[in-house]
Image (cartoon, coloured by chain):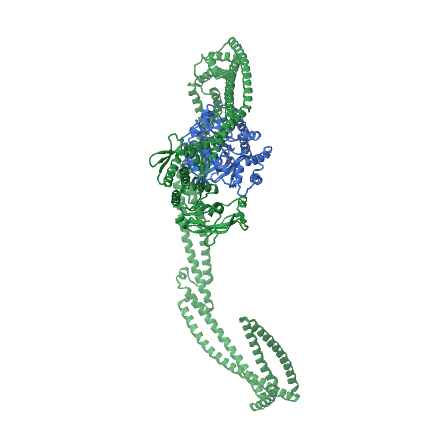
Amino acid sequence: MQEKIKFIHSADLHLDSPFKGMSTLPDPLYQQLKSSTFTALNNLVQLAIDEAVDFVLIVGDLFDQSLRSVYAEMQFLLACEKLAEAKIPIYLSYGNHDYLKERTRTLNYPDNLHVFESDEVECKVFVKNGRPLVGIHGFSYLEQAVLGNKAIEYEPVDGVPYQIGMLHGSTGQADEHDHYAPFQLSDLRGKNIDYWALGHIHKREVLGTNPTIVYPGNTQGRSSKEFGEKGCYLVELDQADTKLTFKPLHQIRFEQVMIDLKNCNDLDQLYEQVTDALTRFTQQKVIVYLTLINATPQMAQNYHQGELNEIIELYNEQQEDQRKWTWIQSVKLEQERNSDESLLRLRDPFIQQLLEQFEQIDWEEAANDLWRHRHAKRFLPDLTEVEKAEIIEEAKELALYQLIGLNNDEN
Amino acid sequence: MKIKQLHIYGFGKWQDQKWDLSEQQLSVIAGDNEAGKSTIRAFILFILFGLSPQQRQRYLPKRGGQLGGQLVVQGSDGKDYTIERIDNRSNAEAICLDQNGQKQAADWLNQELNGVDRALYNQIFNFDVFGLQLEGGFSKEQLGEVLLSVGMTGSDRIYQTEKQLNKALDRQFKKQGSKPALNQLINQLVDQERELKSLEDSVVAYQRHLEKSETYQAEIEQKRARIQGLYRELDVYVEQQRVYPAIENFQLVKQKLTEFPEKMDFPEQGEARFRRLKETIQPLQADYEVAKRQENDLEADRLQLEARLLSDQKIRQISAKLDHVSQYHDQLTEKKHLERQMEEKEQMIKAQLNELKLNITESELKQLPINYTTEETWKKLADQYYHTTKQITNDQQSLDTLITRGVILENEVAELEAKTLSTREKNVIENELEQINQRFNLRQQKDHPFMKQQLSHRVFSFLSVFLLVASLMIILVNQNNLLNGLLAGFIVLVGVTFIWQQLKFRKNWLAFLNEQSTEQTIESTERRDELVKKLALHDNNRDQLILAREKLKQIDDQQMNITEELRKLTSDLKQTEQAIEHERNQFSFLTNLSVGFWPDLATRLREMIDLMDQRDQLKANHSEQVRLLDQFETETSTQFNDLFDREESSFQEQLIHLNEIAVEQSNLREQQEKLTERLKEQSEIRKTIEAKMIPYQDNLSELLKLANVDSEEDFLTQAHLYREWDELKEQQVEMERQIRLHLPETVTSKIFAGEFLSKNELETQIEFIREQLEELEEWVNELVQKEADQQAILKSLAHSKVAVDLKHAFYLTKDKLVAGAREWLVRQVALKQIENTKAVFQTSYLPVVLEKASEFLGQLTSGRYLKLDFDQGNHELFLLAADQQTYRLDELSQGTVDQLFVSIRLAISSWLAEHIRLPFLIDDGFVHFDRERKREMGQILAQLSDVHQMIYFTKDADGFEQDSDCLIVL
């Protein structure tokens, strides 16, 4: 009977990565958030030692190119040394965020770190008790964008009972991320690889079994989009079975919470409801994005008049000093406007015209002053279609609120 | 929706009032001032949209009662519905019922109103025709404003919005400013970016230091390697110095070896091996000599012995002859024995002949025809004669005895006949006895009841046994418990009865016996005894008489028999005597011889003849033996003539001599065998020694061959030379070993080739290297120090978080800018769209309204004015008349101006209400209209009522009288 192997599959640690949309987070919490990627790394190391795994896989984007620091490298070196003491090897490939061209060798890492230095798929053999046990295949990004299908380059090697493919890339269908090293599931299934350790997509997902194809997600959420528990997979592999156990590593989690305000008539009730909804996060460090639905006109008015924000600030003030905290980062009121809109179109030609106008926005005209500002233009990224759509919605909401939002009734 | 009926329960001045509106689309409600027209209008609005409690206060019924009422309307589905509101019921909520009184859903009314609320309704459907009148001029912009103001949004609101957005945008960002938040963030970012640049340099610096450190490390490694190399070199020189004597010796030996051939052919350890072989071979050779000699001696002995040996054939002949000697002796003995026997027989024959004295010769005797029959006949005749004579005598005596006994018996018979009863007397006595006995028997047996009882007892016993056996059989066969129980009971019953019967029978039996004994009388018994005795005596006498008579008869018979026998015997005796005579005639010598001697004579004659035969046989045998003996002796003497001495004439002596020869030859043969055996053994010993010697000799030869010499002397000379050469070689190897042990291959190979440094040269080299080493070590120490400095710098850089913090700060600021910019953009987009909409609204929709208004104005003015438009500067409105003249507003009459505004208002409303079918509530004010124009107005309203229901409130109903269907006069 072949020996069983146990390893950790992680990816997208994005050490020292910046966090988006955190400008309003109070400094003490921001400081914690800043170090959270390193805490996740430490948690990963501790997990590997506690579980006495055979090896650790890091499938790309260990570092974040936007913040390349010696400190981050140093932290990873310390992690490697700890694992070296525990005699646990690390197999590392670089991804689109820490691609080889951008990397200059800085520190001298211990021998337990095995880096895939080539942009061609190569195989490193993990040896246990003097016996070759696992063929670990992988490649690193040489440049930021790898647009070819790398999956086809993976070929199992002879003489080892297990084959693992490390692949930092996305399926052709993925839409949230760039389509780097795009592959089809059929490409992966066609190879005689026992376990596909994927990276790049930050959302945890098991794409297939037999062979097992897994995105472990990133180890620490970095924005409201990367919500929920974040961590790695502890994988136990034998000839018959693959056992996957998700292990959270994050220090701070992001959450999206929806609160139904159908029965909420005043701000006190609102405060109570918010407190209730967030009770489940006590004993954790959580950054929450609230969405309020079914708001009464009164609540909507409170929201637009900023009174609702005061309640949130009150809640946040109490959290700030806690060891474990739940911080409400934003509140969004979701209103059903579609039916209103059609109604508005019918009864008000101006609104009808205005809404039509929102369908043909001249972005140049609207954004130029700021986006073409001689200094600001360096710092402002081009707007994505999604962002544009969001901005349209918000602008529409703002315009309607300003034009007809409040006192549209004699009453 | 169409209103069909109004029913006021109580509203303002109206109390319990009901109006049915026209089936047509147009309804005219006419009444003077204060007649309650506005209240009805307010009532309709109240029912459709409700009123706040404060507003309801205003319409509480003047005369008390409940505020409220209902409208009957035709719904969008063509069916009638009732909408009812009552002040103090559910906050005056509308209750909507269908024709069946079924309550409609809460938002039914809102749906029927197409979502139009009170404000919008007021703007579009419920208006005062003169509400539009503006003071002063009427520019295009103004009319645009009118359009905006008539719309739900209202121009004010739009302006307000624009204002607010602009203000907020200015607060956020100014293109050239520095105070607004975003401007500040931009400046901050520029600064941070600059800092970041320098931070990026720190990474480069780290890299630079790292590279430097690595260069130092490499250099140190290199120098250390060089130092190690030098040390190794130094070690070699020092070692060379130390092993210098060995190097010198090596060279010396090498020199000496040149005197010898390069290679010497001599076997390995040849001399020693040679000597060892010689030592081993010598004793073997001695042994071999001894063995060989012994073998020769034995061979000589053997030859000598073989000369004395006779031929095998001769020995076999002697042996065969000697084998027959015992037979010869036996024959000799036999001959003597025969001679003795012959003598004995002769004697016996002579004695017997003398004894018999028969006067007969041997030859006569031999010729007598005496055989076994003769002997038998003589014997038989003698016996017959003797027995017959004797029998006759015996019979004569028996006859005499019998005659005597006959006489005695006759006397006895006569006596017994006298004592015996006669037959009659005997019968008398037997009869009497019979009678007595019969009497007894009758009384005892036949009449006694016991006999009967005995019979019945036997029957009962047989029956009981049968029943018992039968019952037992049934029990054995049957398995019915109940029946078995019953049968067992029955068995017990029968058994008990049987035992009882037995006891009873025994008792009866005893009684019977007692009875029998007592009944006999003494008298009868005595008489019977007497009679019996008489009879018994009679019987005894009679028996004796019979016996005596029988015996007498027997004696008579015997006398007769003996007499007969005597006669027969006498006859026999005569015959015998005749036979005897016959024999005497045949054998004359029997004549005088009594028959009683005959049987023995025959035997003795016979024996004598036998003896003579035996004697003759012995004679024949004797002759044969003598012949055989002579033959043997002759043969022997002839055969072994050469072996015998002439003196040995005696055959016995010859035989003894022959025997001696045989013994001697046998001994010689034995000796020969032993010698041969010993010779064989000795030969084996010699061969063994020879075999042992062969390998040694081979080795020796091999050694000589290897040494390439022919003699052992040459070999020893060669061995001496080789020893010298070998010692030198060994010395050379030892030196070489020592040198190799202490010096590396590169150096040793040179030394062995004769290239080596002298002692002085070595010292110079060692000194030079030591100087180099000192210099290098100093250099390395300096480099190590430099590398350590670099490591310290690297460590401080690696552990510094300043860079990280600054980077995060930069990204945070950038994040803030992006967020702020986004917020700014939202406002900017909103503002731009409002502005654009306004422009479009003012420019695009105005012509439509103007066209419609022109149509209405033309109708109202009976075609006098054709078109309503703005001048080129868009500043002023003008009218184009049918005569193609244009008129500014101030050039028009008040009535025309009224008509113009009514046209515009209706145009605006009809344009706005294009998609919604709701009743128009139009308040009058057509005070300035002449009758004609009022009529025209009515027509316009009627025309509009094609699409919408029109409820027209007016002060006077002039112009509508002709259509009384639609007229309600208050």
Foreground residue among A45 and B353: A45
Task: Answer with left or right where residue B521 lies relative to residue A201.
Answer: right
| Residue A158 shows in this picture | no
Question: In the figure, B280 relative to B591: above or below?
Answer: above
| Image coords of residue B344 (percent x, y) | 46, 55
Q: Quadrant of residue A361?
A: top left
Foreground residue among A275 and B492: A275
Foreground residue among B494 and B843: B843
| Residue B825 shows in this picture | yes
Q: Quadrant of residue B753?
A: top left
| Image coords of residue B271 (percent x, y) | 47, 19
Number of labelled discs? Answer: 0
| Image coords of residue B529 (percent x, y) | 63, 86
Foreground residue among B240 and B887: B887
Could you say which chain is coloured blue in the image? A
Task: Answer with left or right where residue B22 lies relative to residue A322.
Answer: left
Question: In the figure, B319 relative to B779: above or below?
Answer: below
Could you say which chain is coloured green in the image? B
Q: Residue furthest left?
A: B883
| Image coords of residue A380 (percent x, y) | 47, 27
